Image (cartoon, coloured by chain):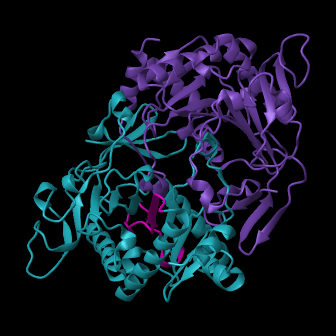
Chain colours: A cyan, B purple
Amino acid sequence: MPELRKDPVLGRWVIIATERAKRPSDFEVTREQSESASCVFCEGRESETPPEVYAVRREGTGTDGPGWDVRVIPNKYPALETTGELNREGVGLCDMANGIGVHEVIVETPDHHRAMADLSVAHIAEVMRTYRQRIIDLQEDRRLKYVLIFKNQGRSAGASLQHAHSQLIATPITPKRVKEKLDGAKRYFDYKHRCVFCDYIKQETELFGERLVAETAHFVSLSPFAARFPFETWILPKRHMLDFALIEDDEAADLGQILKLVLLKLREALNDPPFNYVVHMAPYRRPRGGYWTTIEEDYHWHVELIPRLTQVAGFEWGSGFYINPTAPEVAAETLRNTQV
Amino acid sequence: MPELRKDPVLGRWVIIATERAKRPSDFEVTREQSESASCVFCEGRESETPPEVYAVRREGTGTDGPGWDVRVIPNKYPALETTGELNREGVGLCDMANGIGVHEVIVETPDHHRAMADLSVAHIAEVMRTYRQRIIDLQEDRRLKYVLIFKNQGRSAGASLQHAHSQLIATPITPKRVKEKLDGAKRYFDYKHRCVFCDYIKQETELFGERLVAETAHFVSLSPFAARFPFETWILPKRHMLDFALIEDDEAADLGQILKLVLLKLREALNDPPFNYVVHMAPYRRPRGGYWTTIEEDYHWHVELIPRLTQVAGFEWGSGFYINPTAPEVAAETLRNTQV
């Protein structure tokens, strides 16, 4: 069973994933990405993965067989485990809990050779609706406080498998960075009685425009004013929405369109860089232990996308203070002018 | 002039280092580490660097000539600039300031081929006393709130030059992670009227022992209970000290001893991994704008050392929630049993 442990000074929780335990010599191996021949995410290999928890299937196909477009399975090497109750205990002045949670893989396509950017807009929209469905389904599990959806593409972005996939980790604790964002948005709302993200979108689209990357009917993509990384790019819904689970089908289709556009622009401008994206949304509203006071006005979900172009070094780890060698205005202009 | 910019939600400052501006094609180049033949940190090349601001020199040698053991020079490509006053301004709902600060390189040895772990204990102690001296000297500059000392060794840890060196960045703003640590330590002190680090050292050395890596007369090295990374290792002074600048000469000698021991153990156990370390100490006490209320009891400086063994991926960036595949107890036992 993995463990959750809390730093007594920072209050930062970590997952000690003992089930994935590594010996010193394991770190020396340069893992190659899977070839198609050995890839269990490919169509026809469904029996070699844990049983699917959800799939977008063509009519007449059966669970754990071929015939799907998007398929969700439990991670074979989960960072958290699904069975048991959350038990907290003290260890001297430190705190820990058992590692309860959910860790799933969203296989985005049956085709080993297509990256997300190669999928059709309609197919990417199907992936987005799959995210929505899993967020809604997992809400029933009262132990869970938060769902983080993320994607690693490319080995130096942390992807150990090449086949296009996203991941979902649901935790019994609201992660630190999410709490900080909620607190920041709430502070702004308390002062202004407006959503900071709504104001920010208005400012960037109507007042400035120089950090704008792309715009569709329902979404806007921009380089954030205080970007930590070169070509860091956000995608935000124009409509105020607390939760990713609230997107309508037409919005999911539109999100597929802007996501494909941004991914193609990044690929073209930066020579197919490895990247991560994360979906930042509000925690589940629970009566206790979570952010049960979170209300509709407090937050506004969005996607943070980070191409992995530079090494994060000692200064950044030590200070939380990032040095970005590319002005967001230059990154946005480059992406705006990149034809795809 | 670089810019400081603040995220309107998180309150996180970043440095937009426009002087180091990169075009998209620059990210594709894999920079090789400097060979000795072209290294300006080597003895005899002093005229090719900016003039030294401090050096530990043998008697009879002159400024910016050979004959030094440790040499401090301004960074040729600084993230922050030294001249001017700090001016803050608003940009819509965002905040920025001009990038005032100090960025220096501490060249640890004239010899291109020796890593810090290869230097004598007395020589490493000289490097530590150099850190102390620069912290004391820079305190005179009233614009500066914080000094962060850090070291990147190895290309994948962010070092662009191979020649052994540390860096120092002094900022007009207390970095976010430091503020969080100060706040955490203060909360503990307000509740317990004891220093959380003193209590933690006592717990780890007297009560548990299983996360202990090494111990000398004045210092203790341990794997932190909630380590974010495999083999993350801290070094803490046993004596309660707010500031690195307060170490006595015998403590600096002792720090040289434990630092060399830990570096040799990591090199032996993990096949010479790239690593970062950072010195976390209290900000300068200033009457305004800084943590002027910081008092003697609130904080306890320490060194955080992180071997770079795993990739940080989307989950970690998105959540601030780290997954560590090596239990700290296993890492500590491995290092305790590693003979050097």
Residue placed at 34% from the left, 86% from the top? A249
What is the quadrant of the N terminus of chain A in the image?
A: top left
Residue placed at 27% from the left, 65% from the top? A107
From the viewer's side, name the closer residue of B201 and B7: B7
Task: Please give left or right for residue A281 compared with residue B143 in the image.
Answer: left
Q: Quadrant of residue A139?
A: bottom left
What stretch of residues is rendered in magenta? A272-299
From the viewer's side, name the closer residue of B46 and B107: B46
From the viewer's side, name the closer residue of B227 and A161: A161
Residue at far front of view:
B37
Task: Please give left or right for residue B93 compared with residue B288 in the image.
Answer: left
Residue A274: in magenta span: yes
Q: Is residue A131 above or below residue B274?
A: below
Q: Is residue B37 above or below residue B317?
A: above
Task: Please give left or right for residue A34 compared with residue B135 in the image.
Answer: left
From the top left corner, tell me how far across and down residue A286 is, in percent.
37, 66
From the top left corner, tell me how far across and down residue A278 is, in percent.
44, 63
Task: Please give left or right for residue A101 compared with residue B197 in the image.
Answer: left
Q: Quadrant of residue B8?
A: bottom right
Name the chief secondary structure element in magenta. loop
Looking at the image, can residue A194 be seen?
A: no
Q: Is residue A5 above or below residue B206?
A: below
Residue placed at 81% from the left, 66% from the top? B89
Residue A73: in magenta span: no
From the top left corner, tell me how far across and down residue B175 is, in percent.
68, 48
From the top left corner, tell me how far across and down residue A12 is, in percent.
49, 46
